[in-house]
Image (cartoon, grey):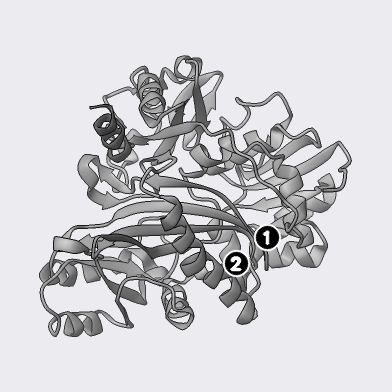
Amino acid sequence: MKERSVGNTVLVVDGGGRGATLVNKYAQSEYVERIIAVPGNDLMKINTDKPVQIYPQLKTTSIPEILEICEREGVNLVDVSQDNAVSVGLVDALQELGVPVIGPTKAAGKIEWSKVFSREFGVRQGIPQPSFRVCYSEQEGVDFLHTEPDQPWFVKADGLAEGKGALPAKSNAEAIARIPEMRRFKDAGRVYLLEKWLKGDAGREGEEFSTYVFSDGENIKFIGNAQDHKRANDFDEGENTGGMGCSTPPLALTEGIMRRVREGVIDKAIAGLNAEGRPYKGVLYLGGMLVSEGGQQNPYVIEFNARWGDPEVQVVLPGLKNDLFEIGMAIAAGDIKGLELETDGKARVVVTGASRGYPGNYDTVKGKRIYGLNEARKIDGVRLYGAGVKDVDGKHYASGGRLFYLVGEGQTVIEARLRAYEAMSIVFIEGNNLHYRTDIGWRDVARLRSDYR
């Protein structure tokens, strides 16, 4: 890769833990002098000595303002890592302005911002995925379910719903009762899908995994894998959230399974988007499910995301040894063929610290004081990434649903998990308002402990 000049400015379009992770990674580049984040958050500056400027008054969809910042500040690279920004065409606007950008166009990003398009695209490309039915009214879904055998379903909003648009239902009756809940997603839920739960041998549920790749529209480079924990509560109970934690590397993903993921999903998705006039340039996220069928673990697509996942990026990106600025410029130039990715081989576990009540109503937690974050991040092998936290003169206050992320690292998931939970044990929110899962990484902990016997 050709030599880059120093003194560059990078703009990260995100305001949560994902953006905080990206800011930290770009700050490690010898080519980057300063970083701008829109909207950013108050804790983005804690992991770097380089200048970080945030614009909390803006939204990730504030296209004219973002373009003006790029021109005024001489931005050299923009990382569009938030789904709403992709869906309104921010990448397209930046490309027209001539600013190098990492992220897909609105057309390519439709693989995330329209679940209907994604599923119908999967049918066209022969990508393994659950059976589904697209519904254009509440009554249509009710009538369809009356014709189906009783079984579990997901009721999914077609549009973007901040990771909360997939409602689980354990029976036809429960699915019928949940269809009206699509109204709370407004336009995003006017069209919805009824999607069958994936069940394998003996009716067993599958195991989730996440895979990340870079693409320049044609070439693909695998970054890494993780295992997300989307449900709000321990034992995978409760509502879906944006993510309550995850671990890497997921031990269920053998070399053989990853070959099928590459050939049966990723290659088909990138080639298919290209063939349909939607070349994909950026980070593509595959949210998958391993289903045991005939004694073999087969990968299925649960969803595609047109950007980094949150909180998966918090465990995957820190292990990447390459310079992220160089990667971003190569993607923007449409040439990653010669890129060789290196990782540090460490295991990582991230635990999400959330407001009590998340993903439902957590209004009573806003403004409550958070204690212990500074102490937690001083533990060896622990990183802190902020999200919905306000910093007022060094004191921290809750301002959102998902508040912060504590990442532990080690040689095994057991070691990494111990560090993450040691750090979390120091933190509390006044009024006992901190919520987090206590079982992140449990599947791989069980596998490793089994190996020790």
Q: Quadrant of residue 421?
A: top left
Work out whether residue 448 or residue 45 is closer to the camera in this orientation and state it: 448
Q: Amino acid at mark 1?
A: Ile
> Sequence order check: which comes first, mark 1 or mark 2?
1
Q: Nearer the viewer, residue 209 or 421?
A: 209
Residue in the picture at 32% in, 22% down = 430
Q: Based on the displayed image, in which of its 4 quarters is residue 155 positioned? A: bottom left
Asked whether, in this view, residue 191 is left or right of residue 12, the answer is left
Amino acid on which the number 2 mark rests in the picture: Val
Left or right placement of residue 383 versus residue 137 in this view: right
The foreground one among 323 and 48 is: 323
> Which residue is the site of mark 2?
88
Position above or below: 12 against 346: below
Query: Are the two marked residues, 1 and 2, in contact with CB atoms closer than 8 angstroms?
Result: yes
Q: Could you tell whether 318 is left or right of 369 in the image? A: right
Q: Position of residue 59 (x, y in %)?
A: 59, 52
Q: Label 1: which residue?
A: 63
